[in-house]
Image: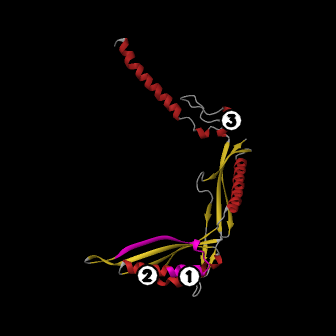
Amino acid sequence: MPYQNVLKYTLPALAAVLLMLIAAWAFNLPPVSAITDRDSGPAVSPATGEQLLTDDQIDVVQVSGRGSATGSPDLAELSLAVSVTADTVVDARDSAADTMTDVRKALTDEDIDEDDIATSYFRIYPNYEYGADGREQKGYTVENGLDVTVRDTDEVGTVIDAAVTAGGDHLVFNNLNFVISDTSDLEEEAREAAIDNMQDKAEQIAEFSDRELGDLKIVSEYPIGGAGPTLERGFALSAAAADTPITAGDSVVTVVVYGIYELE
């Protein structure tokens, strides 16, 4: 075989073998996260020679902190509705309007300000019955919803009873929610507790790793640019034969923070 033909077939084969050896060596390197020895210098890419991690990126600890503060709600939000079904739209609408007028008057009689009573929705729709002969229309339903703010939480049960008495069988009670109108003080308290919790975690991690905790380099509150602190609400409803006793439970404001510390 001529010398040129030997080179033609041998050189590509040797190049392929060399590439396989280089790839095998590269894939057997330890992961970047395992390269933590400061004395050996920063991690370097075998392909480009570029630095993968700086010393600062290696010698840090990232931790989160959570803090909470508890307060008593000072507002109650009620969601009520009047729902009336009649043979015609006009009859349903007229009956619903009369009932809603009675409900709104009952609320104002309980010292609920007109500005704290707002219509939340208004719907009219037909009703159907389904049988062997198919669908048959059976009247119309009119629904009129209200959002009511009660500024004295001790009077929530009384307000509900007044609305039920005025609305009768047409009244629908959708929801009750207790609220803290201004959570800024609770947020501050929860935020301080979250920072303390984060600091404690960082000190523990440094101690358990036989390192010294350095300066706090970055700190942020979660979610960044989002809704901020969360508010958990609750209430207790006790069954009774006469008045409706309702007690506002505690509300909890929670803050979560994240920080990056140096490790020395």
Label 2 neighbourhood size at 10 Å, few (<14), some (14-19), many (20+)? Answer: some
Q: Dot 2 corresponds to which residue?
A: 95
Label 1 neighbourhood size at 10 Å, few (<14), some (14-19), many (20+)? Answer: many
What amino acid does circle 1 point to? Ala
Report the residue at 66% width, 32% height from top.
Answer: 40
Q: Nearer the viewer, mark 2 or mark 3?
A: 2
Q: Nearer the viewer, mark 3 or mark 1?
A: 1
The verdict on residue 70 being magenta is: no
Report the residue at 58% width, 87% height from top.
Answer: 242
**Horizontal side of residue 240 vs 122, given as left or right:** right
Label 3 neighbourhood size at 10 Å, few (<14), some (14-19), many (20+)? Answer: few
Instruction: Give above or below for 252 relative to 142.
Output: above
What amino acid does circle 2 point to? Ser
Q: Is residue 178 visible?
A: yes
- Helix, strand or loop at label 2? It is helix
What residue span does the magenta drawing correspond to? 101-127
Viewport quadrant of the C terminus: top right
Measure the C-alpha gap from mark 3 to mark 1.
76 Å
Q: Dot 1 corresponds to which residue?
A: 106
What amino acid does circle 3 point to? Arg
Reading the chain from its start, which is encountered first: label 1 or label 2?
2
Q: Dot 3 corresponds to which residue?
A: 38
The verdict on residue 113 being magenta is: yes
**Horizontal side of residue 71 vs 82, given as left or right:** right
Locate residue 35, reporting x and y percent: 62, 37
32 or 161: nearer the viewer: 161
Report the residue at 65% width, 78% height from top.
Answer: 154
